[in-house]
Image (cartoon, rainbow, N blue to C red):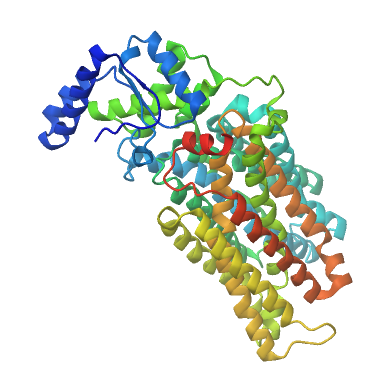
Amino acid sequence: MMRASSAVRARSPVRASSCARDRRRHDASVHKGAASSMRYATRVAGCVRARALGADVANNVLHRARHRGCRDRVIVDASADDASAAEPASELNGAVLRNFLFPALAGALFGWDIGISSGALENLTSSAAHGGDGFALSSIQSGQFVSASLFGALMASAACGAGLGEKLGSRKELTIAASLYLAGALTESFAPGFELLVFAKLMYGLGIGFAMHSAPVYISETAPSSLRGSLVSLKEGFIVGGILLGYLASEGVISTDGGWRQLFLESTPLIAVLLAGSLWLPDSPRWIASRGDDDNATRTKAKDALIRIREAKSDVDMVKVNEELESIFAAAAVKDASTAAPLMKLFDKKYARPLYLGLSVVLFQQFTGQPSVLYYATQTFEAAGWSVEDAANVSVILGVWKLFMTAIAVAKVDSLGRRPLLLGGVSVITASLLALAALNSPGEAQTVAQAQASVACIFLYVGAYQLSFGPIAWLLVGEVFPSKVRSAAVGAATLSNFGSNFLVSLFLPSVQEQVGLRGTYLGFASVGVLALISIYFTVIETRGKTLEEIEAELTK
């Protein structure tokens, strides 16, 4: 069970046999039941094993061990087979679900805002046109209504990336997000004028920015490594589910006078649940370790949080909690010579590899046309022979398809891995875009057969996106950044996401007017080819690895 590795073994000849006996007793305890486990936990409480975190981390483990009276009993085991040994059993339990559910709910409320926006805008203007409860809007005002929440999300993302997120921690960010969601939704529901309505949308957008910054960080830092991929990917499913529910809710009130107020108000019960849950959640132990000194008070606080997160009850669980805590503090104790602000630290050359990896997948996600292909979906469905009424339901149909494909990604990401899903999915995305380009001839209307083939390509595109960029881009963003810059880096990634989305949406109509639909699809396909090359050469497989192991691999 214990192997000698190339890593450091710090034990004296006198104590070597003692530590070996302890380890053999632990092996026996697996087969002898709870009594042996108790003896093992008591006997080897001082024997700490640090995993392969890189030379700097290993040295820090040894340094702290000397001051804790177990200088001769520390083993640094670099075996990849023991990568997850420091975590208690990773089966899905109540604590794991709790730590996932509330951040994911923040994502669902983001999706809800996307889903109701077009329906709320249509109801807002149609109610006013019939002399009811609404506002007559110019095209500029309509744009302000739609983009206000996006602008708020950009502002919050910039603030989090500049250091606010690191100071607050992801748990407190969720509380702020829920508070802004609630204030925004209530103000939207009762706004007497258009100006206050736009301000309320801006407030809600600020909540989106805090939520989308904190959710992937919190889930990644608290989930067991064996479930991290599935849980972060499932967050994308909650966003898609929120969008779909928003579409369906909009259809229910589209012809109701003042129905837009009801749409905004309907989100408040879920927001209240999110607010209560965010106050109940423990802080991330990794955030606690990164913010405090390695003293008893900080360790006690981090350990208490980790016990809640891992739902540790038995003595064996407590030994594993201590081991995981040791690896967390080892990574946090690696010296950082830079005194720059958190965002500026990202430009240190040792962070170049994770920075490129994280930001590139987010930018490729947007510049392969994800929001833009759907922009033309309705007219493609109409050309394929769908009625105007049925084509108008494209959003709901595609929403159900997106949810189904996201479920497949959730089921497979921790068994197949991130790289295979990304490479396979982006390959299908690129092929679908090339096919769409071929099916759209400049200056010619599509035949029914061409339009039907285009519909199939759109479904292929959306399905492949939900297997790859949709969930995995944000999974990687939450995994690849070192703990010292994770908050700033995720803030930069979130800002890049919302900013690139804004730019694509802003310039898409004029670009399409200049180069045509075929040229637009070809442009997106070209980006897809670049994305494939980048993914192949830069994206590492993170499946089954702890965050500290990923950090060591990317910063060595």
| Residue sitting at x 49%, y 26% | 55
- In this view, the residue farthest toward the right is 514
Query: 159 or 410, which lies in front?
Result: 410
Rendering coords of residue 246 (x, y %) = 59, 59
Q: Is residue 489 above or below residue 294?
A: below
Query: 148 or 197, which lies in front?
Result: 148
Quadrant holding the N terminus: top left
Q: Is residue 318 left or right of residue 516?
A: left
Rendering coords of residue 544 (x, y %) = 41, 45
Query: 260 or 522, which lies in front?
Result: 522
Quadrant holding the C terminus: top right
| Residue sitting at x 86%, y 60% | 139
Q: Is residue 516 above or below residue 146?
A: below
| Residue sitting at x 56%, y 41% | 480
Q: Is residue 321 left or right of residue 212?
A: left
Rendering coords of residue 461 (x, y %) = 61, 70
| Residue sitting at x 87%, y 65% | 510
Query: 510 or 197, which lies in front?
Result: 510
Q: Is residue 438 above or below residue 252?
A: below
- Residue 289 in sight in this render: yes
Rendering coords of residue 203 (x, y %) = 70, 40
